[in-house]
Image: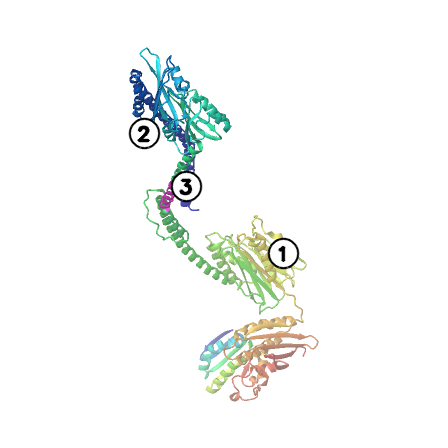
Amino acid sequence: MEIAIINENGNLTVVLKGRLDTLQAAECDKQLAPIHENADKDIVIECGELEYISSSGLRIFLSILKDVKAKGGSLVLKHVSSEIRNIFTITGFHKLFTIQD
Amino acid sequence: MSLANKLSLYISLIIIVIFCAIGAIFLRYGAEREERLVSLYATLIVDNSVDKLDSEISRVEGHLANSATVVEKRLGDSSGLMQMVEQIVDTDSLIMGGCIALRPGADGVRLMEYVCRGADGTWQRKHLGDTDYDYTRMPWYTEALRQDKAVWSEPYFDTGGGNKMMVTCSYPLHDADGEITAVLTADVSLGALSGEIARLRPIDDSYAFILSDKGVFMAHPDSALILKKDIYAYSREKGCPHIAEIGYEMLAHKKGSRHTDIAGEDALVVYEPIPGTGWAICSVCPYGAIMSRLDLVTVRAVIFLFAGLIIIIILVRLVVLYAMKPLARLTGAASKISDGDLNVQLPSMRPSDDIGRLNNAFGEMQKSLRQQMERLVETTKAKEHIESELHIARSIQMSLLPHCFSPFPQCDNLELYAIIRPAKEVGGDLYDFFIRDSKLYFTVGDVSGKGVPASLFMAVTRTLFRNTAGRCDSPAEILSVINDTVLKDNDTCMFVTMFVGVLDLITGHLVFCNAGHNPPVSVSTGGVALLPCKENIPVGVIEGFVYEQESISLQPDQSLFLYTDGLTEAENASRQLYGDDRMLATLSQHSADTPKELITHVESSVTDFVGGVNQSDDLTMLCLRLKHEDSHTPLHKVFANTLSEISSLPAYTELIATRYGLDAETRGRINLVLEEAVVNVINYAYPEGVEGKIALDCSHDAASGALTLEISDSGIPFDPTAAAGPDTGAPLEQRPIGGLGIYLVRNLSDGVEYRREADRNILKITLLLNK
């Protein structure tokens, strides 16, 4: 998968492309370390090209959300596909995350 | 037999033969010589005896003659006659007695005065004139008168005197007128003669005899014959006419010797007359006696010869052994050399004789052998070094090629097998295959040439194929790229024939391009045929060449057999090629077999064909087949308990989706369910470091529309369904980071069941597709 982090005037946008499965999760977690450091900022995760997510991926989302809430930042998920949105629903994540189109 | 023994034997045999020849000659001429010697000796002895007898007779006659002149003057005095006779007898010891007998005159008065030596040495005197003894009739008297000279009588036994065998010499006496007036006699005993005769023995066992002029034996070893028999009677008695012949000769006063038969005995006879008496003497030497002398000589000679022979043979043996001793030492050293001990010290010898020169030649040979061995060791070392490097090169080359054949985890309906057999340690053949995006990319190629250069080019080609086929999808494009890349720096003008194919593992659609390679064989139960291919030139010949590809649909259970010309051009001892026909025949015999079995059959067929002939070219075979599968066959997949296997799950899901015509949403759902379940097993069923196999099965019940996924593992008992699900309604602060996996499985499927069976955890997940 491909991960890109864009910093716009201190507002961070994370772009996730491809499949976020168990194998990719560890690498992804490592690359997203700057997000944890900037959990006090406004963070957007662009999921338009995220094709697949497993529970390992959900754990990464959840750990970022917990950091953001603790440090007073904000997290918004954008363009989440219906398949992934379904998974968020099943797991109750749709109530925890702010999901925008 | 050793040379020394042979030499000794031959020389000894020659000496024995020579000695035998000398012995035979000695015997032959020795007998003749002995006969001559004996004959000469016998003649000498007979001569000598005759001379002696002659001298004695002459002496007696001389005495009578000497006395005659004295007696003649005193004949008138008859009283002194007796004394004169005594004097005459006394002059010679040989004369035993004598007499004077007057010739009776007209008055008829006889006077005979006789004297003889008595046994006691005294004189016995007899006046016999007036007795009955009429001497005028006695032969000794009458013969003397008749012959008017000294006359010797026949021998006789003197009955009157000494009872001895006697002969009498009568000598006539004359008066002044020359008239015979008296006869003077001297009696000589034959006993003295016999003594002489007894000594007439040239050799032992010989004897002699004397005949009187009447042929009567006067002397003979057999005394019974003496004066009793004449030689003729003896001859008749013995039945031997040769004796009589000798008798004639003797009585004819002849001298001679002859080799004749005497009374059945071969003998040498020598005879001679005794002058003045009419007697003859004969010596008889039997040949047996002569030869016995010779035999004695012969035995001595043979003993000496034999002793000499033994000494010579011993000397020959010693000389031969001495002469051969260096050869024996050299032989010992040479046999050590032949056992491989090249450092053995050769015996030191003077190079003057043949053995010495041989020894020198051996020394030279040993030196050059040693040098050769040293060179050989060096060469062998260098060769071993090269061989070990080639061996390493071979393992590197072989490791370039894939060795892991079907079943493939990504595609269990593909069967593929390949072998490569370089003619030398390394070769120029290649094959390769890999699966990318549910497609099998494969190639078989043959670099021009053999050995190390070809192997290097092969490695380059194989790497180019891997790289190119990893990103290009069409065989023609792959070949074009490889061709252009190779030609950029191809100073060696090497080229490679290649067959490149891309097989869609789901549809069986095969796209291929043949760059000057042998056409592959299509093998199916319906028939075996070479696959018709468009002609393209080999890779590495013309830059920018546009390769043309084509395609066929590979039917289920249709095998594709690829090979290099090392197969069809394999030569046997009669220089025949294995050829397409034999290959096609072998393949058609086993058309229903698996690719591995097909290759094994062809390999054993070509091995039998070439026999023991060295392989002349590299040989490569690759065979593949897509198994026919119906939709009831469960999709089966086995993999290791490592997280990296997760990457194969999308392809597996794709297979299921294609098989059952599933939409993207369901496909994603199945993928997620499988991943969560498998990750769970990997994380919890296997303690750290324990390896195991996880099996996936998928089946579909068309009636109920239920798709069943079964995950089975060999790990410790672990029931994921036992865990309590998360509280999805809890606020963020109470939500744990993990624990969502099995919850997702449960919520994305229509049923999850766990069971433990035969030491395996089995998780059955059901999805109802018709819902």
| Residue at 32% in and 10% down | B177
Residue B231: image tag: none
Residue B122: image tag: 2
What x and y, as percent, mark residue A33? Answer: 45, 79
Looking at the picture, does residue B705 appear above or below residue B435?
A: below
Camera-side mark, 1 or 2: 2
Q: Is residue B389 left or right of residue B761?
A: left
Which chain's residue wears label 3?
Answer: B
Residue B586: image tag: 1
Q: Give the quadrant of residue B176.
A: top left
Hey, what amino acid is under mark 3?
Ser
- Pointer 1: residues within 10 angstroms few (<14), some, or many (20+)? some
Q: Is residue B19 left or right of residue B236?
A: left
Q: Give, as a single range, the part of the protein colored magenta.
A: B306-324
Camera-side mark, 3 or 1: 3
Hey, what amino acid is under mark 2?
Thr
Residue, disc 3: B12
Q: Of marks 2 and 3, which one's residue comes earlier in the chain?
A: 3
- Pointer 3: residues within 10 angstroms few (<14), some, or many (20+)? some
Which chain's residue wears label 1?
Answer: B
| Residue at 67% in and 71% down | B632
In this rendered view, identify the residue nearer to me: B621 or B128.
B128
Which chain's residue wears label 2?
Answer: B
Camera-side mark, 2 or 3: 2
Hey, what amino acid is under mark 1?
Thr
